[in-house]
Amino acid sequence: MDPGAIKTEVFLLPAANSYEKEGSVANSGRWIQWRYKAVNPPGAARSDLWIADQLFKTVRALYTQGGDIAKVALEINGYDTGSGEPLLNFTRLADNGSTACGNWIYSGYYNNLANPPTKRRIRETSGIGLHPNWSFAWPLNRRILYNRASADPSGKPYKPNLALVRWDGGK
């Protein structure tokens, strides 16, 4: 895609490769190990830690000038670029420039400017412990993404009076 042909801003952050910096690395296998710098990075390239540090310090300095945290929340949630109205959730995102969203997985967390889900503190009365109106759980305010551990291998809930999902192999 040609960045000049679309209405977006592209930033190139000249980050050093892993062998051009010293520090710890972690992976999805839960390993942490130390890596030593083998060579210096080329040109203006810096370590990602240095870049993140500089960004943090710059943003922190900008915050001393004031800012609107509600506007930032709206931008993260997603909004209609024509009206400025917040999007209900990520299912309303479009790829034609009519919407914008800072992080699709949080879309919906700030979709009601008068009473955003993140600020709600309505206690649950059902007794099953989901608390759907107490804060926001991403994505789509879902408290349960899967529920296999609450039922035996045949699908019978361990606690029938608190069953959230029942499995019927015939349906």
Image: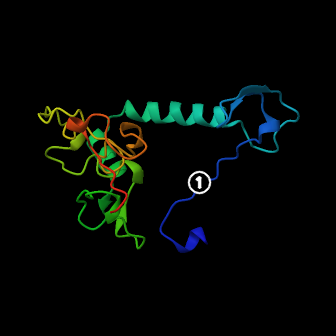
Horizontal side, residue 156 vs residue 25: left or right = left
Q: Is residue 22 visible?
A: yes
Q: Please name whichever residue, 164 or 83, is drawn nearer the observer in this view of the structure.
A: 164
Secondary structure of the residue carrying tag 1 is loop
Q: In which image quadrant can residue 3 be found?
A: bottom right
Pick the front one: 93 or 64: 93
Pick out the residue farthest to the right: 38
Residue 50 placed where, x, y %?
65, 32
The quarter of the image holding the N terminus is bottom right
Q: Quadrant of the C terminus?
A: bottom left
Q: How many marks?
A: 1
Mark 1 residue type: Phe
Query: Which of the 4 image quadrants contains residue 115?
Result: top left
Q: Quadrant of residue 37?
A: top right
Q: Is residue 23 above or below residue 67?
A: above
Residue 102 visible to an observer of this rendering: no
Query: Which residue: 38% across, 69% down?
Result: 94
Q: Position of residue 143 (x, y in %)?
A: 31, 41
Q: Nearer the viewer, residue 2 or 158?
A: 158
Q: Nearer the viewer, residue 52 or 93?
A: 93
Position above or below: 54 against 112: above
Compared to residue 117, the image places residue 7 above or below, namely below
At x 41% / y 43%, what residue is drawn? 148
Query: Residue 53 vs residue 75: left or right?
Result: right
Q: For the residue carrying disc 1, how many other residues have a C-alpha within 10 Å: few (<14), some (14-19), or many (20+)?
A: few
- The extreme left residue here reads 125
Residue corresponding to mark 1: 11
Give coordinates of residue 158: x percent, y percent.
32, 35
- What colouring method underlies this structural image? rainbow
